Image (spheres, rainbow, N blue to C red):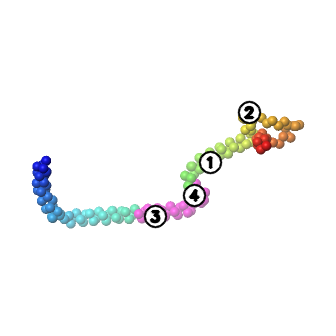
Amino acid sequence: MTKMHDDNDRDFEGLEAFFTAARDAAPEPEPAFLTQMALQAEVIATERREAEAAALAALVARRQTSQKRGLVATLAAAFGGWGALGGMAGGMATATVAGLWIGLAQAPSLMQSMGLQSTVVASASAEENYLNDADILALALMD
């Protein structure tokens, strides 16, 4: 095993001479290459400055536009625009109509829908009983 190790060391000694020679004689880039690289860097820097200036101009224009909008338009933009508000308004209108219908249609009370009728007997007529079933249940639970 040591013999293999020794053979490898001899091979590396020859390579080390090549590496040392390469380190000592570092190649210098040609002046034409350096000039071309400098020109490309200048073009890239100019394009970047122009892009930053355009982005800044767009930001200033957007801020001026947002300052001209009114409160309602700004709120509409915050919710996703007028299209989104149209959908929300449609949903809210439906919920409002449903709430009014339920409130005005005099749906049976919770007690009646569960099958629990009030045990209070109306004296002479239904107009004299001023409490509904839910109020009667609440009074009964308080005692």
Say what secondary structure mark 2 lies in: loop
Residue 94: percent from the left, percent from the top? 65, 43
**The residue under label 2 is which amino acid type?**
Gly
Q: Are marks 4 and 2 in contact (CB under 8 Å)?
A: no
Rendered residue at 25%/63% (across/down): 36
Q: Earlier in the sequence, mark 4 or mark 2?
A: 4
Q: Is residue 32 left or right of residue 41?
A: left
**The residue under label 1 is which amino acid type?**
Ala
Q: CA distance from mark 1 to mark 3?
A: 36 Å
Q: Which mark is residue 57?
A: 3
**The residue under label 4 is which amino acid type?**
Thr
Residue 16: percent from the left, percent from the top? 14, 58
Q: Are marks 1 and 3 in contact (CB under 8 Å)?
A: no
Q: Earlier in the sequence, mark 1 or mark 2?
A: 1
Q: Residues within 10 Å of mark 1 (few under 14, many from 20)?
A: few
Residue 17: percent from the left, percent from the top? 12, 59
Residue 126: percent from the left, percent from the top? 84, 38
Rendered residue at 61%/57% (across/down): 72
Q: Give the magenta part as a residue range.
A: 52-76
Say what secondary structure mark 4 lies in: helix
Is any part of residue 19 visible from this angle? yes
Residue labelled with disc 4: 74
Q: Quadrant of residue 95?
A: top right
